[in-house]
Image: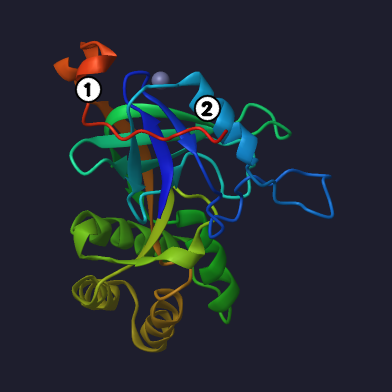
Amino acid sequence: MNQLIRCIPCNEIFARTPYDQWPEYEYVSGSAPEPYRTVKKDEFQVFLKHHRNHPMEDLEILEDSFVSEKPYSEPTKVSYFKATNGKDKFVIKRFRKRIDEPLSYQLIQGDYSLKLLRFEIQPEEIIKQLKRELDNPPLPEHQLEAFLKLYQQVLKTIDIKNLERIPEDSTHPLEIYYKMDEVSLAYLLRNCRVIFKGQEYNEIEAFIHRQREDGVLLLKAIYQIQIVEAAQSKKETLPILHAIEGKKYVEKK
Ligand SMILES: [Zn+2]
């Protein structure tokens, strides 16, 4: 899957073929009957001409490294993914300023990580759902609040690393939902016995079981992309002729 070609001295890249599995790739509106723009062969020739005699290398894209700051459906978003030449790591920034423009690629030497910004319960959704499901008779306000407070307390004891991610629940790439683990569930149920008695307890227990797998009791984490640029290696400041180990692509005549 060698689709990225890097000109080593210029630090520019060319993306040779589309990644068909990425749904938003090269989508151009209004260009039916061929909505997926294909990269023209002569664009590659232009790239080769521009970087004639420069050493080049293939970059391998690291699988599952694709991240973006905006919803998947947003066509003009900035995305990042990781690639490597086998030795150095790169972050590729992919973007377009307008929907009818082709995608641009920028090479950043370094790496990125996802930083956890917030980890939270979904209070409004929980209250709404409790009022909807436990309405005969409705739960008094102080019990609703006590439940939220308790769930906040449970959240504080949870290590996000132990949780199972629910991938299909988010339309935003940096908002991820998690299912509470068994230990936290037991902790929550045990403490619910203090707030709810008898039939009320049975109802809240059933509610928790209904909502924890894919409902309002999912825990929400918000991440941020952090890019760490690596210091430029000395090799890159040497004249082009010295970088002989690079691969050369030959222009077609
Ligand atoms: Zn070049």
| Percent of width and height locating residue 161 | 20, 59
Mark 2 nearby-residue class (10 Å; few <14, some 14–19, many ≥20): some
In this view, the residue in front, 190 or 25, is 25
Q: Is residue 56 visible?
A: yes
Which residue type does callout 1 highlight? Answer: Ala
Displayed quadrant of residue 196? bottom left
Outermost front residue: 253
Which residue type does callout 2 highlight? Answer: Phe
- Residue at the (32%, 62%) spot, across then down: 151
121 to 136, vertically: above or below:
above
Q: Quadrant of the N terminus?
A: bottom left
Left/right placement of residue 93 relative to residue 24 reads left
Of the image marks 2 and 1, the number of the one nearer the N terminus? 2
What residue would you read off at disc 2? Answer: 47
In this view, the residue in front, 198 or 47, is 47
Q: CA distance from mark 2 to mark 1?
A: 19 Å
Left/right placement of residue 64 relative to residue 182 reads right
234 to 137, vertically: above or below:
above
Element at badge 2? helix
| Percent of width and height locating residue 136 | 58, 82
What residue would you read off at disc 1? Answer: 243
- Residue at the (42%, 41%) spot, across then down: 4
| Percent of width and height locating residue 85 | 26, 40
Mark 2 C-beta closer than 8 Å to ligand 1: no
Left/right placement of residue 29 relative to residue 175 reads right
Element at badge 1? loop
- Residue at the (42%, 85%) spot, across then down: 206
